[in-house]
C-alpha cells in the first residue's frame, strides 16, 4: 500500500524561529492535506493542496504541493508557543476506489520554547 | 454549531467485553470514517462508509465492527476479538468530493 514518510519526527525550537517539515510518498498523490493536532483532541485541517506546484498560505503557515506529486512541504514562520502540537501530512492517491481515503504520515511533534 | 461529536471522551473496557464508541455528525456529509491512533504513529483506517447502509473495511478492521443505519451516525464497536484495543479513536466525515476530512475530538479507550 501507499506509504508516507514525514520528517522530522520531532522539533524543539525557540519562539520566533521558522519551522520546516515535509512528507514524501512512494507513489503519486492527487491531494495533500496538512493537519495540526493538540493533545487529546482531533486533528484540525490547516491547508489543502490539489495541484502539483501549488503554494498556499494560511496566516503564518505556507504549504506546497511538490511538482513530482510525491512530496509536500509545510513551513511555519515566526513560531509562537501556541504552535505546539503534532503536525500530520495526509495524501490521497490517484484513481481506484480510494474515495476520501487518506494516507497519513507519522506526524511531527513540535515544541516551542518561549 | 455544525460538527462531529464523539462520545464518550474516555472509555474503559474489561477483558472479554464489547464496547461501542459513538460518532454523530450534523454536517450533512455522506462519508464517515474511523481511525485508530497509537503514540508515535500516524492514523490508521479501521472502517469507512460512503453512504447509508454501506461500509468498507480499512487497513486494520479485524476485531472491530460498524453500522451505518443513519447518515448522521457511524458507531464503532470494539469487540473482544481486538486483543490490543488501547488507543485513541478518531471519527471523521467528508463531503461529496471526499477530499477534506473533518475530525471529531476523539475517544480514548483503555483496558482495565
Image (cartoon, coloured by chain):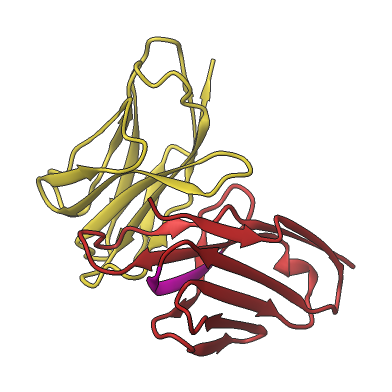
Does residue B1 show up? no
Whole-percent x, y for residue B50 in the image: 18, 56
Of residue A31 and residue A13, the one placed in the foreground of this image is A31
Q: Which residue is painted at 37% across and 14% down in the image?
A: B17
Q: Is residue B101 left or right of residue A15?
A: left
Of residue B49 and residue B17, the one placed in the foreground of this image is B49
Q: Which residue is painted at 33% across and 25% down in the image?
A: B63
Say above or below: A103 vs A17: above
Does residue B80 show up? yes
Residue at the extreme left: B53
Main SS, magenta region, reads: strand
Say above or below: A26 vs B57: below
Q: Which residue is painted at 71% across and 60% down in the image?
A: A8
First to last magenta residue range: A28-35
* Quadrant (top left/top right/bottom left/bottom right) for the C terminus of chain A: bottom right
Of residue B103 and residue A91, the one placed in the foreground of this image is A91
Q: How many labels does the image show?
A: 0
Say above or below: B7 vs A48: above
* Chain A drawing hue: red
Q: Which chain is yellow?
A: B
Amino acid at each position: 500500500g501507499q506509504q508516507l514518510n514525514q520528517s522530522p519526527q520531532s522539533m524543539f525550537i525557540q519562539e520566533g524561529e521558522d519551522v520546516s517539515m515535509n512528507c514524501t510518498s512512494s507513489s503519486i498523490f492527487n491531494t495533500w492535506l496538512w493537519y495540526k493536532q493538540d493533545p487529546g483532541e482531533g486533528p484540525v485541517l490547516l491547508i489543502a493542496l490539489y495541484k502539483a506546484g501549488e503554494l498556499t498560505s494560511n496566516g503564518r503557515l505556507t504549504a506546497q504541493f511538490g511538482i513530482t506529486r510525491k512530496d509536500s512541504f509545510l513551513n511555519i514562520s515566526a513560531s509562537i508557543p501556541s504552535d505546539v502540537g503534532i503536525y500530520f501530512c495526509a495524501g490521497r492517491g490517484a484513481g481506484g476506489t480510494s474515495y476520501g481515503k487518506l494516507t497519513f504520515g507519522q506526524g511531527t511533534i513540535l515544541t516551542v520554547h518561549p | 454549531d455544525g460538527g462531529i461529536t464523539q462520545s464518550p471522551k474516555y472509555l474503559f473496557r474489561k477483558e472479554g467485553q464489547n464496547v461501542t464508541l459513538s460518532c454523530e455528525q450534523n454536517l450533512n456529509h455522506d462519508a464517515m470514517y474511523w481511525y485508530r491512533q497509537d503514540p508515535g504513529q500516524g492514523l490508521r483506517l479501521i472502517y469507512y462508509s460512503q453512504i447509508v447502509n454501506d461500509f468498507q473495511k480499512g487497513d486494520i478492521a479485524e476485531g472491530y465492527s460498524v453500522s451505518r443505519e443513519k447518515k448522521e451516525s457511524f458507531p464503532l464497536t470494539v469487540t473482544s476479538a481486538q486483543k490490543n484495543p488501547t488507543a485513541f479513536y478518531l471519527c471523521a466525515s467528508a463531503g461529496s468530493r471526499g477530499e477534506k476530512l473533518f475530525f471529531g475530538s476523539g475517544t480514548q479507550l483503555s483496558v482495565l
